Image: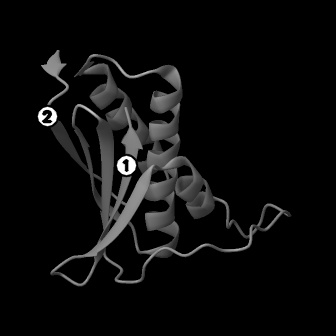
């Protein structure tokens, strides 16, 4: 087990339907390696955020390129790189189930902090923070 002071891991993703599940598995492995462990609610929120951020990157930004997880004594961070410069935006959810619009608003409500940073290659990195 690693100390909560600093831990980081990185996962490269291939843009395909199973990418969100792969990202969740990587998140679970990251969480399992933390010491002390985080609470169930924090773990569930991290898994949901990872799933939504990767799904959004696939649906709206041409695919997730990389997912990184890191921790500090007080927080967990998830960073998702994608190839689009366009920032995520809140949309009106489509309650028919066909048009989406739920993912970013869930991340926005769950996260204790969000940042969108431009990348030198023209894409962006979306970072979400959770309190431990």
Mark 1 falls on what kind of element? strand
Report the residue marked by disc 2.
6
Left/right placement of residue 75 relative to residue 8 reads right
Position of residue 22 relative to residue 64, above or below, is: above
Would you identify the image quadrant in which residue 95 lies? bottom right
Name the foreground residue: 38 vs 50: 38
Residue 60: percent from left, percent from top: 50, 74
Instruction: Tell me what residue is drawn at x 43 percent, y 78 percent.
Output: 87
Q: Are marks 1 and 2 in contact (CB under 8 Å)?
A: no
Mark 2 falls on what kind of element? loop
Q: Check the picture and name the quadrant holding the C terminus.
A: top left
Left/right placement of residue 90 relative to residue 12 reads right
Report the residue marked by disc 1.
129
Residue 9: percent from left, percent from top: 18, 40
Distance between the Cα atoms at labels 1 and 2? Answer: 14 Å
Instruction: Tell me what residue is drawn at x 28 percent, y 78 percent.
Output: 123
Display colour scheme: one colour
Between discs 1 and 2, the one toward the N terminus: 2
Instruction: Tell me what residue is drawn at x 52 percent, y 31 percent.
Output: 44
Residue 127: percent from left, percent from top: 34, 58
Position of residue 10 relative to residue 53, above or below, is: above
Residue 32: percent from left, percent from top: 31, 20
Left/right placement of residue 41 relative to residue 83 reads right
Left/right placement of residue 90 relative to residue 76 reads right
């Amino acid at each position: 087990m690693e100390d909560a002071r600093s831990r980081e891991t990185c996962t490269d993703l291939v843009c395909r339907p199973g990418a969100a599940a792969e990202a969740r598995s990587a998140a679970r492995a990251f969480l399992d390696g933390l010491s002390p462990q985080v609470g169930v609610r924090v773990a569930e929120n991290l898994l949901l955020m990872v799933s939504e951020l990767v799904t959004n990157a696939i649906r709206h930004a041409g695919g997730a390129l990389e997912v990184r997880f890191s921790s500090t004594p007080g927080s967990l961070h998830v960073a998702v790189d994608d190839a689009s410069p366009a920032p995520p935006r809140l949309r009106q959810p489509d309650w028919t189930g066909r048009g989406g619009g739920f993912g970013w608003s869930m991340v926005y409500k769950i996260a204790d902090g969000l940042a969108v940073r431009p990348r030198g290659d023209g894409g962006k990195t979306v970072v979400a923070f959770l309190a431990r």
